[in-house]
Image (cartoon, rainbow, N blue to C red):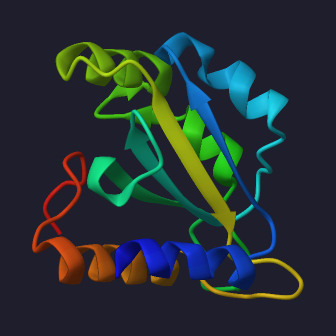
Amino acid sequence: MFKEYVCSLVSKFPIHGTFKILNGRELSNKIRENRVPDKPGVYLIYSESIDPESLLYIGKAGTMKTDGSFKNQGLSGRLCAKQDGKPRPQFFQEVMDQFAIQALYFQWFVTFAEDTKILPAKAEADLIQVYYDTFGRLPLLNKDI
């Protein structure tokens, strides 16, 4: 069920993409090379391959303010920000080392654009709900919700 849901997002959110890193230090270069936009959206992080069984994390980028504008952190900015108080490249390298992961795969979707206006928080919540409905748990790196 989760795999089908993610596949449906490809047609629902036409601005999307994937990339992989072999170590955490590659993150900024891969974001730039793959032209990940600094727009509101959601992202999924997998270990080893883009497969629901290997999903580690579901996240969002872009928080809407009460006036309808977004705070300054879209997808590319969020992927380079901090997690657990650490720069993302360092955090991802530690995850890869801890779990003996050779590669991390990133899948991202712009959810709020001219043609489609889905709040990233809703898209993230929907993804987490479908993941939970499918597997009965949260992805490994998602904190308690």
Of 111 and 68, the residue lying toward us: 111
Residue 77, horizontal then vertical, whole percent: 66, 42
Residue 121, horizontal then vertical, whole percent: 48, 76
Tell me, yes or no, if residue 134 can be seen here: yes
Q: Residue at x 65, y 37 (%)?
A: 19
Tell me, yes or no, if residue 65 can be seen here: no
Residue 92 sits above or below residue 3 on the image: above
Q: Residue at x 28, y 24 (%)?
A: 95
Residue 89 sits above or below residue 53 on the image: above
In the orientation shown, which residue stands out farthest toward the right?
Answer: 114
Quadrant location of the N terminus in the rendered image: bottom left
**Left or right of residue 4: residue 99:** left
Of 100 and 41, the residue lying toward us: 100
**Left or right of residue 24: residue 66:** right
Of 136 and 116, the residue lying toward us: 136
When asked about the image quadrant of residue 135, the answer is: bottom left
When asked about the image quadrant of residue 99, the answer is: top left
Residue 90, horizontal then vertical, whole percent: 41, 16
Q: Residue at x 80, y 50 (%)?
A: 37
Residue 107 sits above or below residue 3 on the image: above
Quadrant location of the C terminus in the rendered image: bottom left
When asked about the image quadrant of residue 9, the answer is: bottom right
Of 108 and 120, the residue lying toward us: 108
What is the tally of numbered marks visible in this picture? 0
Residue 92, horizontal then vertical, whole percent: 39, 24
Q: Residue at x 69, y 69 (%)?
A: 70
